[in-house]
Every structure is written in C-alpha cells, then in structure tokens.
Amino acid sequence: SPYQGFPTQETTERWMKLMDGYSIRVPSTSLDDLDLESIPLNDDSGDVWVSMNVYHHLHCLDSIRHQIAGVRCSNPHDPTANHTEHYDMDEAHYFPPHIDHCIETLRKRLICQPDLGVRAIAWNPDKPGVAFANNTVDSACVNWDAVQDWTRQHSFSEEEKLITTPDGENIPLC
C-alpha cells in the first residue's frame, strides 16, 4: 500500500490527504438528538465544529506509525511543519498519554465493530511448515459479544493438536 513504510514526506502527505476533512461543520441542531455540544463556528451560521470518528482513528494510526519509526508526528494540518523530524526515543512524554490514548481508542473501535472477514491460510511454498494469511478480505459490522460467544463455541486449543504441517508435524497456534 502507498501508506506503508517509513514516514517520509511523501507517505506522510498521503496520510494527511486521508485525513483531509478532519474538521467539519454541522448545524448545532444536528447534535441535539445525540445530546452533544460542540464548539460553535464564529461565522454566525449556527454551525458547530465536529469531526467524524474515522478521521480520529486515521490520525491515531498515523501517530502510532510515526512513534514506531521514531519520527515526530507534527500537526497534520500545518503544511509548513517538518513531518519527518526525528525525536529522541527517550522522550517518554511523547508516548504517554497520546499514543496510549490512540491505542486504546483503536482497541475499543475494533471490539465495537470487529471485522469478521475470513482470512484464508496457506502453506508458504518457500518455507516448509510456515503458514501465511491472505489479508484481502471484506469487512462486516456486528455485535462484539455475539462474536465472542460464537468464537468461544467454535474455538479449539493447542492441546487438541488440530493443526499439522503437510509433513504431519504439530505446530503451535498463532
């Protein structure tokens, strides 16, 4: 994917484009049924500033991507910022609380709406006994508790030794 790899200026610009539209306006009355309040815009329109969760999730992924690479994640809305500036990995203040918040936000989102697309598993022809997954799957939205219940009813343990290589070797579950 063009979004993968070390955060270069080019990949960061792609991520910034993904997040284009982070801040949006809606009539303040549109939040009434949600029992939410948001910052009013100062143009006398009656509109308020909101953002869709998907943009926050993308921002979090981008921040984690930068953290892993040891590159400071600048304000994505600042075109003059150096989006590939390295920082000292000992800057403990950079991880918590922002990255911790992002990881927790994404964890909650994945559990709230898990992707139940099935990933087919195949043996790697170049590495005997090593399996790999097909990561091109469709997405579905479901109730997480129902997913866990179904999974528990259909799960098996490593002790049951249900996974073996073509040579008959038992391998640990991933």
Image (cartoon, rainbow, N blue to C red):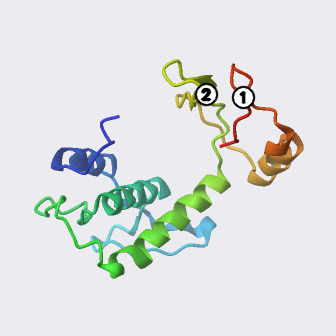
Q: Residue at x 30, y 57 (%)?
A: 69
| Residue 45 sits in quarter | bottom left
In this view, 88 is above or below 2: below
Is mark 1 in CB contact (under 8 Å) with mark 2? yes
| Quadrant containing the C terminus in the rendered view | top right
Q: Is residue 118 visible?
A: yes
Q: Residues within 10 Å of mark 2 (few under 14, many from 20)?
A: some
In the image, 142: left or right of 32?
A: right
In this view, 3 is above or below 57: above
| Residue 61 sits in quarter | bottom left
Percent of width and height locating residue 163: 75, 31
Observer-nearest residue: 63 or 131?
131
Q: How many circles with numbers are drawn on the protein?
A: 2
Residue matched to label 2: 129
Q: Residues within 10 Å of mark 1 (few under 14, many from 20)?
A: few
> Residue lying farthest right?
153
In the image, 110: left or right of 172?
A: left
Observer-nearest residue: 29 or 171?
171
Q: Residue at x 61, y 23 (%)?
A: 122
Q: Is residue 157 visible?
A: no
Observer-nearest residue: 141 or 21?
141
Percent of width and height locating residue 130: 57, 30
Percent of width and height locating residue 51: 42, 61
Mark 2 or mark 1, which is nearer the start of the sequence? 2
Residue matched to label 1: 169
**Could you tell me the amino acid type at mark 2?**
Gly
Q: Residue at x 25, y 60 (%)?
A: 76
Q: Which secondary structure lies at badge 2?
A: loop
**Could you tell me the amino acid type at mark 1?**
Glu
Q: Which secondary structure lies at badge 1?
A: loop
